[in-house]
Image (spheres, rainbow, N blue to C red):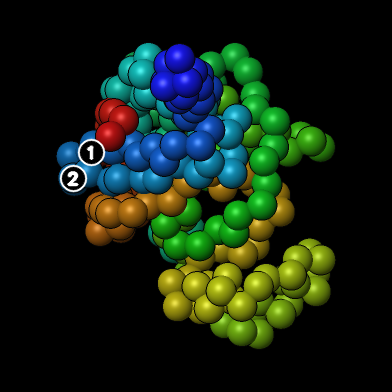
Amino acid sequence: MKSLLIILLAIMISSCTNSKSVDQHAVITTKYGDIEVLLYNETPLHKENFIKLVQEKFYDGLLFHRVVPDFVIQGGDPLSRTAQPEDFLGSGGPGYEIKAEIGSPHFRGALAAARNQNPEKKSSGSQFYIVTGVGVSELQLNQWESQRGIKYNPAQRAKYIAKGGLPSLDTDYTVFGEVVSGMDVVDKISAAHTNPTSRPVDNITMSIKLK
C-alpha cells in the first residue's frame, strides 16, 4: 500500500510539471541556416506564448522585416506573409499584447519582444528581435547605470564587455531568451541589403519549430 501511495504521489508531481520549469529550445530556420534559441523560464508569459505560436505554425512563412546592422534583426509580423515589396511592415500582430516581464539585459544574441509605445511596456504578441549590437565599455555601462537606475552585477558587466549588446534597451523591453547557436546566421541576416525602411530587399523568410 505504501509503495502504491509513493507511485501515485510521483505521478501527481509529474503531472504538475509544466513548461514554466522545463528548458525549451526553438530553431528558427532561414535561407542562411538555423538559429537555435533558448527560451527563459524567468519570463513564463512570453515563453508560453512563443511556444503556442510555434506549435500553431504562426511564424512559418513570415519575414525578417527589419534589419539594422549593429542593432537588431526583427520579425514576426503576420502581415509580412503576403506583403508586397513596397509595403511598410511592423504593425501586425495576433491581436493581443503580453504583460511586460522586464529584467534580463540585452546582450549580443538576446531574444526580445518588440512593442509599440505604451506606458506599461507591454510586448507585441508575436514580433521579436535578436540583438546583434555593438561593443560596450565599462564607462558606457557606468553611464547607463546612472541614467537608468540600473545596477549590473559583475557577471553581467563582464558579459556585456566581452560580447557587446544594447544596454540602451535595458528596462524598456522584455528579453525572453537567447541564441545558443547560429549567431553567424544572425550576422548574415544583419548584413542583408535593405531599403530605406530597413526591410531586406530580398525577402528573408522564417519557419520555427520546437526542439
From the image, tell me which residue sits under label 2: 33
Q: Is residue 110 visible?
A: yes
Spot occupied by residue 209 in the image (x, y as percentages of width and height): 29, 28
Query: Mark 1 belongs to which amino acid?
Result: Thr
Query: Mark 2 belongs to which amino acid?
Result: Gly
Distance from the alpha carbon under mark 2 to that under mark 1: 5 Å
Q: Residues within 10 Å of mark 2 (few under 14, many from 20)?
A: few
Q: In the rendered picture of this protein, how many numbered marks are placed on residues?
A: 2
Q: Is residue 11 visible?
A: no
Is label 2 in a helix, a strand or a loop? strand
Q: Residue at x 33, y 37 (%)?
A: 26
Residue 90 horizontal side relative to residue 85, left or right:
right
Spot occupied by residue 93 in the image (x, y as percentages of width and height): 54, 21
Q: Residue at x 37, y 14 (%)?
A: 56
Q: Residue at x 71, y 54 (%)?
A: 171
From the image, tell me which residue sits under label 1: 30
Q: Nearer the viewer, residue 142 or 209?
A: 209
Q: Nearer the viewer, residue 155 or 88?
A: 155
For residue 162, which quarter of the picture? bottom left
Spot occupied by residue 104 in the image (x, y as percentages of width and height): 60, 54
Spot occupied by residue 28 in the image (x, y as percentages of width and height): 29, 37
For residue 121, which quarter of the picture? top right
Q: Quadrant of the C terminus?
A: top left
> Would you place residue 127 above or below residue 155 in this image?
above
For residue 63, which quarter of the picture? top left
Q: Residue at x 50, y 44 (%)?
A: 40
> Would you place residue 198 above or below residue 127 in this image?
below
Marks 2 & 1, CB-CB < 8 Å contact: yes
